[in-house]
Amino acid sequence: MAQAAPFPGDEAQQRLLGGGRIKARGLMPDCSNYTYLAHVRGDAGAETLAVYKPAPGETPLDDFPDGTLGKREVAAYLVSAALNWQVVPLTVYRPDGPMGPGSLQQFIAADLREHYFSLMPARSESFRTMAAFDVIVNNADRKSGHCLLDADGHIWGVDNGLTFHSLPKLRTVIWEFAGEEVPAKLRRDAERLGIELVAGEGWVRNLAQLITGAEVRALANRARRFADEGRYPEPTSRWAYPWPLI
C-alpha cells in the first residue's frame, strides 16, 4: 500500500509510523469503530503514540464499502498534505497491523475539553481552512469533537474515514461561514489541487490506490467547483448536521 507524502520535516515520523512495531495499548472510548491507542517503536529506539484503526473493526455502513474507512483516513491526509493546509495529522496505512490492516495516525495530545464549539470564534481562520477542506473531501461526519487543539496552538481534524463519496455527503458542524467568500489563498490551493488530480501524477497515483477512480474524479470536480464558485456552501437541510454534534 502506498504511503502518504509527508509534510516537510515529517520524513522520520513517516518512517516510524510506516515501519515501526505496533503495540495496541487499549481501546479508545466513545468510538463507533474499534479504535486503539497504540505505541509504535522503531528499530533505532524511536517511539511515538498513534491511533490505530483496523479494518476488521469497522462497523458496516450502508453508503460506504466495508473495510475502506482506514484507506479514506490516509487519503484525507494525502489531500491535506497536497494542499499544504495541515488539517489532518500524519497518517499511513499498515497492512501488517496486529488486529489486521488499517490506518495508523499520529496521536495528537490535546485537551479534550476543547472542541469546535469552544474554540470558535477565536480560531475562525483555522476553521475556515478546515471547512474548505471538508467541502473538498466531502466529509460526511465533521463533529465538534473531531477538532483538536494541540500544545502548539494548531488545530487538527481527525476521524476522516467518512470522506470521498462520489455523491454529495457533506455533514458538518462548521456552518458559520456559509455563504461567505472563500479566502483567495484557499481558492488558489483548491484550483491547483484540481489540476493535479486531473493530471494524475505523483501523489495522485498513491491516492488512486486508496479510493476509486470515480471518487478521484468527483474529488477533482469538487475542488474545481469550490475554487470557481468562491463561496462556502450553505446547509440545505437538517441532514447537513451530524449527530451527535460533539
Image (cartoon, rainbow, N blue to C red):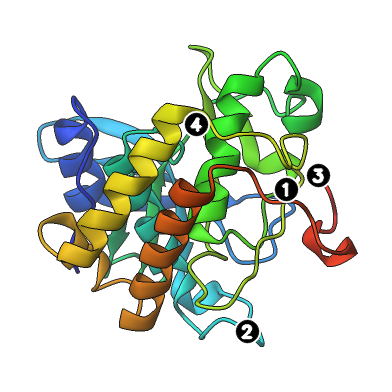
Q: Which callout, 3 or 4, points at the residue further toward the start of the chain? A: 4
Q: Which callout, 3 or 1, points at the residue further toward the start of the chain? A: 1
Q: Disc 3 on helix, strand or loop? A: loop
The answer to whether one can see residue 25 in this image is no
Residue at (50, 45) in percent of width and height: 133
Q: Disc 2 on helix, strand or loop? A: loop
Residue at (70, 65) in percent of width and height: 32
Name the residue carrying label 4.
Answer: 108
Asked whether 32 or 96 is in front, the reply is 32
Between the residue at mark 1 and the residue at mark 4, the CA separation in whole angstroms equals 17 Å
Q: Residues within 10 Å of mark 3 (few under 14, many from 20)?
A: some
Amino acid type at circle 4 is Ile
Q: Residues within 10 Å of mark 4 (few under 14, many from 20)?
A: some
Q: Residues within 10 Å of mark 1 (few under 14, many from 20)?
A: many
Q: Which callout, 2 or 4, points at the residue further toward the start of the chain? A: 2
Name the residue carrying label 1.
Answer: 143
Relative to 61, say whether 42 is above or below. Answer: above
Residue 230 rendering spot, x and y as whole percentages: 53, 42
Between the residue at mark 2 and the residue at mark 1, the CA separation in whole angstroms equals 19 Å
Name the residue carrying label 3.
Answer: 246
Between the residue at mark 3 and the residue at mark 1, the CA separation in whole angstroms equals 5 Å
Q: Quadrant of residue 17?
A: top left
Residue 66 rendering spot, x and y as whole percentages: 51, 85
**Are the residues at dot 2 and dot 4 in contact (C-beta closer than 8 Å)?**
no
Q: Which callout, 1 or 4, points at the residue further toward the start of the chain? A: 4
**Are the residues at dot 1 and dot 4 in contact (C-beta closer than 8 Å)?**
no
